Image (cartoon, rainbow, N blue to C red):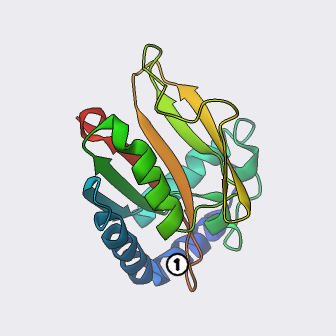
Amino acid sequence: DDVDISVDALYEIYIDYKKDSDLMEKQAEYRARILNSCEEVNSVKWRVKDPLHLIKKIIRKKKNSSDNPKYANINVINYRDIITDLIGLRAIFIFKAHWSLVDEYIFNNLNVCSDSIITIYHANDDDLTLFPKASLVKKHEGSTYNYKLEQKDSRYRSIHYILQGEKPTGCKIELQARSILDEA
């Protein structure tokens, strides 16, 4: 009720998503193995979004589509472009000082979406000297990537990247990178 999307449209998305879930599992595992090869990465966790959680997220975001305009016209054709965490990865490194090495490894070994902002979540009293200083912009292999600092009152700390998935699923992947202390 009160959501501008039909049950049929949600069912279409559900069925489409379910048909590729095994391939998404394989893509997640593959990228987790790549991240595990980074000397500074201590551990990697991954998951593929549960199909019912996907439907609940769409309903929740559609309900507040004035806050999330990209969800206003979500459908079976475009949901993989709109929802960026169908696959989730979390790379844990030991020391905050290793972030720049992990960041470089991510750019050299994974396909970071240049049209998505890399968000650095931090607390108000964090030392941010480890992160890009001047313009929060990175050039890599002819593309420009933008970082954004975002303060969280909850003291949540993490760096979020959006990776481009590959065919046949083509879905986006959210990669969270953080120190083991931030994970704790």
- Location of residue 62 in the rendering, given as x and y in whole percent from the top left corner: 66, 47
Residue at 37% from the left image edge and 77% from the top image edge: 30
Q: Is residue 2 visible?
A: no
- Location of residue 29 in the rendering, given as x and y in whole percent from the top left corner: 33, 74
Tell which residue pokes out farthest to the top in this image.
Answer: 125
Q: Is residue 37 above or below residue 26?
A: above
Q: Is residue 107 above or below residue 180?
A: below
- The residue type indicated by label 1 comes to Ile
Q: Residues within 10 Å of mark 1 (few under 14, many from 20)?
A: few
Residue 148, image quadrant: top right
Helix, strand or loop under label 1: helix
Residue at 52% from the left image edge and 78% from the top image edge: 15
Residue at 60% from the left image edge and 65% from the top image edge: 10
Residue 23, image quadrant: bottom left
- Location of residue 135 in the rendering, given as x and y in whole percent from the top left corner: 70, 34
- Location of residue 112 in the rendering, given as x and y in whole percent from the top left corner: 58, 61
Residue at 30% from the left image edge and 33% from the top image edge: 182
Q: Is residue 153 above or below residue 89?
A: above
Q: Is residue 15 visible?
A: yes
Horizontally, residue 159 falls left or right of residue 81, namely left
Horizontally, residue 160 falls left or right of residue 22, namely right
Please state, as top left, top right, bottom left or bottom right, where the C terminus lies in the image. Answer: top left
The residue that disc 1 covers is: 15
Q: Is residue 164 above or below residue 83?
A: below
Residue 79, image quadrant: bottom right
The one of 155 and 97 positioned closer to us in this rendering: 97
Count the marks.
1
